[in-house]
Image (cartoon, coloured by chain):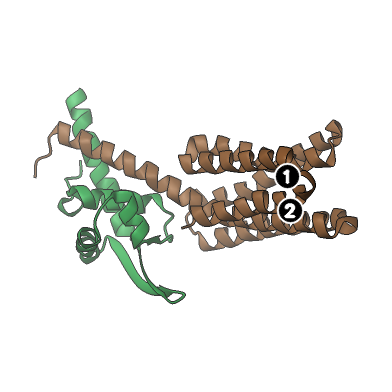
Amino acid sequence: MTVKPEEAGALLADIAGVERRARAFLTYNRISDSILLWGAIWFAGNCATHFLAPWSGWIWIGLDLFGLAASVAMAMGARHRDTDASTAHINWRIPAVVLCFFAFGSLWLHLGQFSWRAEAAFWPTFFSFAMILFGLWVGRALIAAGVTLAALTLAGYWLSGSYYDLWMAIGGGGTLIGIGLWLRR
Amino acid sequence: MAGPDEIIHQSLRLKIMAVLNTAARNEWMAFTRLREIVGATDGNLGAHLETLSKAGYVAIEKRFAGKRPQTRVRATPEGRRAFAGHVAYLRNILDSETF
């Protein structure tokens, strides 16, 4: 078998193309569980804020701690399943990223003294921003998901009136759950 | 320099191996997702996977995900080695032409 340089170049270009698509899919699949988890937490937390307002602060603290613990447990589970040393360490980056975002967001919410309404819009838009940035490297699906989440959050901020928490439960948490299911389809 | 691998060299089989090589060593990929990434029909993909499986380059598993039957595939260590060798061979052809 003889392979000409033009054919070798074309085959290598084909390989690069499918590898890019495969990496995007594998990344979507790996992060979809975390997105589903935080979507469920946001849904529950915002429902609690609407229906159980006096206890919502404690409920949010409990949900956030549960989310962080579950993120770490999911990373440990993924690492246990994955014996490939080149990718095993990558799974730890997901809870590490979540922790960094929490720390940065909490700091600026404290320093900024936002209203409760702005605070409720802050986290989903902050998360949308991260998804869009991540999507620039990984693939367009994450950019589309981030833009959708930000648009729904801002629409709720300006238009939902006294149903803001319920809007955020569905528009924020529900959208994240939808995005997580879509990415793992 | 290693010679070409005639089994992997076929365009679609090369794409299949490239996709499976991207996954972690024990990570499976669903047949439907693989079909979507490489842009093949069910029959065509199935036939080429069969060829790769006979060569020992891929492992194929049929199972039930809930009530739905699912076929999933992963590259074997032999398949990964053969793919790496063939890519090195192709790169070598380009490098030889450059110098």
Query: Dividing the picture into quarters, in which one does residue B35 lie?
Result: bottom left
Percent coordinates x, y for residue A156 in the rendering: 70, 43
Q: Residue furthest bottom?
A: B67
Picture residue at 56% right of the left edge, 58% below the top:
A79
Give the mark, 1 or 2, whose residue is nearer the N terminus: 1
**Drawing shade for chain B:** green
Q: Residue furthest right?
A: A54
Helix, strand or loop at mark 1: loop
Percent coordinates x, y for residue A92 in the rendering: 61, 50
Percent coordinates x, y for residue B20 in the rendering: 35, 54
Q: Residue furthest left?
A: A1
- The amino acid type found where label 1 is placed reads Ser
Picture residue at 33% right of the left edge, 44% below the top:
A18
Which one is nearer the viewer's eye here, A41 or A33?
A41
Looking at the figure, which quarter contains the N terminus of chain B? top left
Percent coordinates x, y for residue A185 in the rendering: 46, 58
Using the image, determine if residue B92 lies above or below residue A42: above
Query: Dividing the picture into quarters, in which one does residue A32 lie?
Result: bottom right
In the rendered view, does B26 fall on the left or right side of B73?
right
In the rendered view, does A99 fall on the left or right side of A1?
right
Q: Are marks 1 and 2 in contact (CB under 8 Å)?
A: yes
Query: Dividing the picture into quarters, in which one does residue A67 lie?
Result: bottom right
Count residues near mark 1 (Cα–Cα under 10 Å), then give few for <14, some for 14-19, many for 20+.
some
Distance, label 1 to label 2, CA atoms, is 9 Å
**Dot 2: chain letter:** A
Picture residue at 19% right of the left edge, 62% below the top:
B47
Which chain is tinted brown? A
Residue A160 is tagged as 1
Looking at the figure, which quarter contains the C terminus of chain B? top left
Residue A182 is tagged as none
- The amino acid type found where label 2 is placed reads Leu
Residue labelled with disc 2:
A166
